[in-house]
């Protein structure tokens, strides 16, 4: 089996997928953090393609950075200064060539993630 990475974002406060959220993917090697790509969620809160497809997959440490503040601003969530949740980094390891699914469940004052399937 080849490994790959996917995500999706659900807006739990509004009860819908988080459309239009920018997400950056980084690979970490030692002290270095390399931006691999930037994607945006579609109307289903998912990316149109795998964030890290099989052809680009390597085991290691990665970070997904969800730009939640921009999304919350765009959806009309009342702003505070500074916003409680603005940029949400999720750092995780991928140790085997498998499907890794790292979703984000978001509200203006909390978030959760897990290894999905």
Image (spheres, helix red, strand yellow):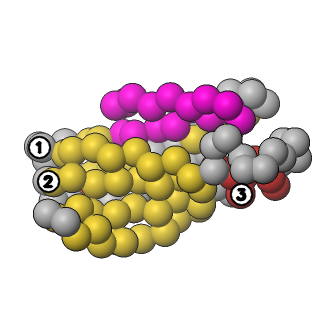
Please identify the quarter of the rendering in which residue 22 is found: bottom right
Residue wearing tag 2: 59
Q: Please report the residue visible at 27 percent of the width from the left and 63 percent of the height from the top.
A: 27
Q: Residue 96: which numbered mark, if any? A: 1
Q: Is residue 97 above or below residue 12?
A: below
Front-lying residue, 94 or 81: 81
Residue 70: assigned label = 3
Whether residue 77 is visible to the viewer of this picture, yes or no, is: yes
Q: Quadrant of the N terminus?
A: top left
Q: Nearer the viewer, mark 1 or mark 3?
A: 3
In the image shown, does 107 or 101 lie closer to the viewer? 107
Image quarter hosting the C terminus: top left
Do the numbered discs 2 and 1 sit on residues whose CB atoms are within 8 Å? Answer: yes
Q: Residue at x 67, y 31 (%)?
A: 109
Residue range in magenta is 101-117
Circle 3 residues within 10 Å: few <14, some 14–19, many ≥20:
some
Q: Earlier in the sequence, mark 2 or mark 1?
A: 2
Residue 39 percent coordinates (x, y): 52, 65
Gap between marks 2 and 1, in whole Å? 6 Å
Residue at 71% across, 57% down: 70
Q: Is residue 79 left or right of residue 31?
A: right
Q: CA distance from mark 3 to mark 2?
A: 30 Å
Q: CA distance from mark 1 to mark 3?
A: 33 Å
- Residue 43 appears in the picture as rendered: no
Circle 2: is it few (<14), some (14-19), or many (20+) Cα within 10 Å?
some
Q: Earlier in the sequence, mark 1 or mark 3?
A: 3
Q: Is residue 78 left or right of residue 27?
A: right
Say which element carries label 3.
helix
Which numbered circle lies on residue 53? none
Q: Earlier in the sequence, mark 3 or mark 2?
A: 2
Residue 63 appears at what percent x and percent y? 35, 54
């Amino acid at each position: 089996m080849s490994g790959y990475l996917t995500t999706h974002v659900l807006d739990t406060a509004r009860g819908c997928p988080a459309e239009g959220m920018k997400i950056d993917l980084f690979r970490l090697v030692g002290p270095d953090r390399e931006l691999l790509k930037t994607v945006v969620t579609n109307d289903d809160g998912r990316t149109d393609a795998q964030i890290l497809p099989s052809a680009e997959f390597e085991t290691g440490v990665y970070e997904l950075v969800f730009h939640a503040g921009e999304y919350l601003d765009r959806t009309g969530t009342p702003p505070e200064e500074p916003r409680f949740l603005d940029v949400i980094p999720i750092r995780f390891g991928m140790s085997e060539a498998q499907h890794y699914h790292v979703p984000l469940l978001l509200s203006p004052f909390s978030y959760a993630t897990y290894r999905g399937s």
